[in-house]
Amino acid sequence: MWRVKLGALATLVVTAAAVAVVLVASGPSDADSSAVARRALAARQAARLIAAIRIPGEVATAPAEPAATSALAGLALAAGPLTVERSGAWSVARPVADVRALLEAHPPTGTRPLRGRPLEFVAREDPRGLAAASLAVTVIATGPRSSEVRAVALARWLMARSPAERVPAGARQLTITRGPVGRAPSLVLHVTAPARITRIRTLIDRLAVVQPGRVYHCPAQFAQVPVVSFVFGSGGAHPRILAVATEQADVRAPATACDAMRFTVRGRAQTPLLGGHRLLRQVSALVGRRLWTRLYAA
């Protein structure tokens, strides 16, 4: 039966360090066809939000137009290089108070107001592939009975997981271990049933990738925290390691880049994955052994 040398496995997992770190995820390539399509989707959604503003007596003074994507745009709801911005401005022959009251009573079509944030709205439904879409409106007095309305719409699109970032279909054997990095694992499971391997592989392949463009100030990580490793092998007389996924056993939900699942395919690091908290529980139910642990306390 195929076995994984624990020393070799230790080199494939992430070593935890008791220091705080800052992670900055990089953005996608503009040449990625999926990225281009999703950026276009976000642009259409942002344009729809601007077009939804309707005020009786308005006169457009600046049409909705593209703005340079900014890593600082929309810090509250949609930050990073995956954000598309559209803006517009209108002159209105109404006092400021009347315009604000009108917008508060009648939010732009397809939006709902953000609680505690006057004249800020979010889309009721975001198309698949978008993370969030928001609309911020400012009303400025230009005279006793006239106002200027300015609006900025932000739509954040999601980077799709590349088809290459999958567990290879040739995986025939799976070893699952749990234990601190560099130490003998407290749990070792060998999965050989093809249907079960396929199911676990599918669960990992369905996880979303960490989205780029955010800065994460990660808390301290400790070497004593157990790590769960999924090592997929090719099987046969000369087995090869095809993919390795590792996750902290005490991962919580919702996950961020700080506690994302590390994933390699044929020795090459892939984009970290989100959803390890649920995955550990799903696989625990499949194999009949609890893989996850309670939150580690130093």
Image (tube, grey):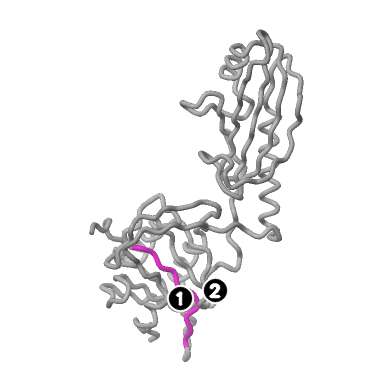
Amino acid carrying label 1: it is Phe
| Magenta highlight range | 239-248
- Check the image and report above or below for 151 versus 258: above
Label 1 environment density (alpha carbons within 10 Å; few <14, some 14–19, many ≥20): many
Q: Secondary structure at mark 2?
A: loop
Q: Give the overall secondary structure of the magenta segment.
A: strand
The residue beneath circle 2 is 168
Above or below, 260 relative to 40: below
Asked whether the residues under the numbered discs 1 and 2 touch, taking CB atoms below 8 Å apart as contact, a structural biologist would say yes
What distance separates the C-alpha of mark 1 from that of mark 2? Answer: 9 Å
Q: Examine the structure image and report whether residue 244 is included in the region drawn in magenta.
A: yes
Assess whether residue 72 is covered by the magenta stretch: no
**Residue located at (36% from left, 72% from top):** 176
Name the quarter where the N terminus is drawn: bottom left
Sequence order check: which comes first, mark 1 or mark 2?
2
Residue at position x 28%, y 72% from top? 187
**Nearer-the-camera pick, 261 or 182:** 182
The 10 Å Cα crowd at callout 2, few under 14, some 14 to 19, many 20 or more, is some
| Viewer-side residue, 149 vs 56 | 149
Residue designated by label 1: 232
Q: Give x and y (percent) for residue 98.
A: 61, 11
Q: Secondary structure at mark 1?
A: strand
Looking at the image, which residue is at 62% across and 21% down?
139
| Horizontal arrangement in the rendering, residue 248 relative to residue 86 (left or right) | left
Compared to residue 101, the image places residue 167 above or below, namely below
